[in-house]
Image (cartoon, helix red, strand yellow):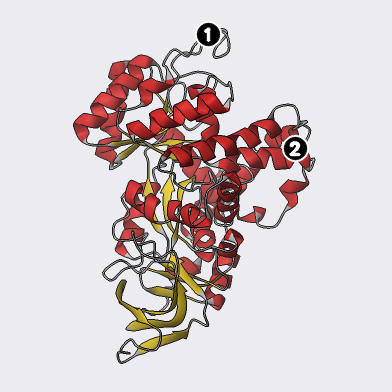
Amino acid sequence: MRWFGKLSIGVGLVICLVLVWVGYSTYNLPKVLHTHPVLPAAILINNIQLISMRPGAPAIEQGRAILVVGDRIAAIGAADELTIPAGVTLIDGKGYTLLPGLIDAHIHLNDEAELAAYLAHGITGLRNMSGYPFHLPLAKIIASGELLAPDFITTGPMLNSKGPNQTLIQQTVTTEAEARAAVRAQYRAGYRTLKVYSNLSRDAFDGITDEANLLGMRLTGHSPEGVRGSGVPHQQPFDIAWQETLGRGFSSLEHIETIVWHGLRDNPTESGMRELAATLAASGEAVTPTLLAHKRLVLIAESQGAYLLRPGLDTINPLIRLMAQDSAKYWSQVDPSVYEGPRAEFYKTATRLLYEAGVPLMVGTDSGGFSIVPGASVTRELELLVEAGMSPYDALAAATRVSAEILGFRQTGIIAPGYRANLVLLAENPLDDISAVAHPIAVIIRGHLLQQAELEAMRAAATDTSLTRSAWRALQMRLAK
């Protein structure tokens, strides 16, 4: 039996080595997120154009300077006129443009390496839209300053009922009792925002909204449709009418295509959308259009899959890339002229009508999902919003001041004394060409200065995602359900 003992020892060693490797793969995060640059005593950026986003301020101010002390904006003044404190890091702005750090209000974070991609593209605030168990401790680590990353908030796991839009990672609730219990469980876990999804039954939706209001929790997500019967939506109305979502505690409604599908019963007319926009404006909920989420499908189809070969896709989580292979094959063979192409154009029209009606709009990309690149996609979303009819200034406001206010990112989104130093320096003026946001010269996150070398290191680190880490997180999510 000696051979059996030796075999057992050998198997035990192999198991130990596998566990060590899994542990290392899971917790070995990119060094750039741990290695903080030394926080300067002060940073003075001189000779800049300033897009402050302060209400009532000019869209852009020439010949300005800004002083950052610690993690706060200490002073703003004319170029060459601010007092320079001892130990200041002086940056010649060269007439470049400074604006608040951008916020992506709709992402799906699957791996910490993606945080580097966001910082590299000037994104200093994130709202994650599908909570995993690792997101809550991650948010605390970021808030404590232990990790160099954008400001981060997350919803809880998606709440949904069974139906055509159910997902693998949803928390399934059908009855009012199940819904209330799920809300209380998410609250006890530490979540303060709930994400609801399309298939929610009426009983579950009522239970979620009532319990959320009792606990002071925020709501966001898709407008629940109820049980989808035969002929819905073209021959029969939805079980839950779109208007029933309004006034129920939503801070934002997600995806313009969902609003057109549910609110217009998939009948895309300008007159209908104009009426819907007026109703929504009067109710007060914000909208995150996520135009890119649908447009990427059109681009994949139009290019017969070539769009899936563009640079940056290696920063998307490897587990997501693996799971999306069937979708990639399907969309590469679709004729976009039949449905998806015309819908993409109407979604821009619908967004313009929301904008003209005064509905608060936020910038979100759905990045981290199939073919939507973390960080870089914010530029693409801003370009689509401008194509839809928003002014570059208002598109930038949606990605800064408006998103900060709606999401509760305190003292950010505006450049003013006392606000946190989340800033982006651009070589070109984005009010002339919104695409200028794609290439930051420097990024400041909570007073930490990232210049070209650091931004390049962030871009490189963004590819350091881990299939093992992601698979472990997905397993944790399944076990927690």
Which amino acid, by three-letter code, is at mark 1?
Gln
Residue 302 in view: yes
Residue carrying label 1: 236
Percent position (x, y) of residue 257? 55, 31
Q: Is residue 39 left or right of residue 289?
A: left
Question: Can residue 167 be seen here?
Answer: no
Determine the residue positioned at 72% across, 54% down: 310
- In the image, 445 versus 90, the foreground residue is 90
Image vertical order of residue 392 relative to residue 99, above or below: above
Image quarter where the N terminus lies is top right
Q: Residue at x 36, y 49 (%)?
A: 153
How far across and down, in percent of the image, does residue 205 sit?
Answer: 35, 21
Disc 2 residue type? Ala
For this rendering, which residue is in front, 148 or 29?
Answer: 148
Q: Is mark 1 on a helix, strand or loop?
A: loop
Marking on residue 301? 2
**Which of the 4 image quarters holds residue 87?**
bottom left
Identify the image quadrant of the C terminus: top left
Nearest to the eye among marks 2 and 1: give it.
1
Please give the name of the residue rendered at 52% of the width and 24% of the height, measured from the top-left corner. 272
Tag 2 secondary structure: helix
Against 244, is 60 above or below? below
